[in-house]
Image (cartoon, helix red, strand yellow):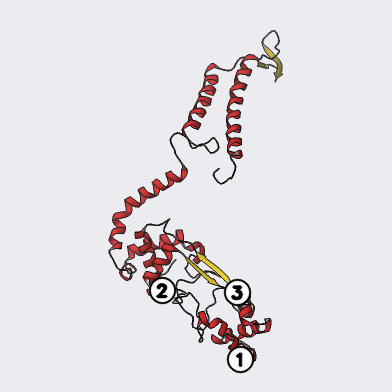
Amino acid sequence: MSDFTSNFWAVYVAGITIVSILACLLLLWVSGKVHAETADDNSTGHVWDGDLREMNNPLPRWWAWLFVITIVFSFIYLALYPGLGSYGGKLGWTSTGQHQAEVEKGNAEVAPLYAKFSAMKPEDVAKDAQAMAIGERLYMNNCAQCHASDARGNKGFPNLTDHDWLGGGTPEIIKANITNGRIGMMPPMAAAVGTAADVKNVAQYVLSLSGSPHDSVQASLGKSKFTACAACHGMDGKGNQALGAPNLTDDIWLHGYGEAAIMAMVNNGKVNQMPAQADKLTEAQIHVLASYVWGLSNNSGNTVQ
């Protein structure tokens, strides 16, 4: 309810809840006071199968009291726990708080195990079978949604099993990226490159850098226009890890291959974001996960199943 700028919906929900409970109580009271017209034998006159008569007897007393107890319980529950719009309840319980408490309890239980790995260098952790089994589960739960279960990535999400690292592939950099997240941005460069024809020529030149099929005439015309891109990618097109600018000579295409894909990048730019995991994982878990990810491209025997 805190997402709304007005308290109308909080009051609305609380009102509907209270009115519904009171309506149940009223229904119980009315059903005990109002009597249907009955025949002399106290039946309603409805008969089935020849001799099965519907009698007009009152509700069993235990059933009526059970109904009342349920209504009383609902008021007590709503006083203690959230349920009346934005009212949080006397106990201050929240599902978020309970989840956090359970996570902290779980982390405390496994802390001694992680302490062993925290004292090890990432390169040594990546060789420990137990650590890698834990790292694999951490990866599957937190990274596979984007980088795929085999860690080979998807369009727009880097392959973690090769040596092509946009911002660097040392354990320290990987750990920092997992902890803080990462934002990669290429600004639209069409205006800096020139005309639409110039953009097309630059695309052909970029293709030529990796030895991909290209038009050599257009590529030669695009070489001079590539200077607008060289500030990040370098005059040789080999990129700059400090800026996160990809190497254009390795024939690895994160956002799509071919002239159309390159032109779209030049014309429109691109913003990619990897979310930070520091609020989900402990420092020790990130240490193991970073070691696991580093090992994917550095330990030949370490593969995701």
Camera-side mark, 1 or 3: 3
Q: Is disc 1 placed on a helix, strand or loop? A: helix
Query: Which residue was labeled with disc 2?
Result: 169
Q: Is disc 3 placed on a helix, strand or loop? A: loop
Q: 45 or 222, which is in the foreground?
A: 222
Residue 188: mark in rendering: 3
Residue 220: mark in rendering: 1
At 59% across and 45% down in the image, what residue appears?
Answer: 5
Q: Disc 1 to disc 3, how far (Cα)?
A: 22 Å
Q: Is residue 130 above or below residue 68?
A: below
Q: Earlier in the sequence, mark 2 or mark 3?
A: 2
Whether residue 15 is visible, yes or no, is yes
Mark 2: few, some, or many residues within 10 Å (few <14, many ≥20)? some
Q: Position of residue 106 (x, y in %)?
A: 36, 50
Task: Say which quadrant the C terminus sits in.
Answer: bottom left
Q: Earlier in the sequence, mark 1 or mark 2?
A: 2
Q: Amino acid at mark 1?
A: Ser
Q: Are marks 1 and 3 in contact (CB under 8 Å)?
A: no
Q: Earlier in the sequence, mark 1 or mark 3?
A: 3
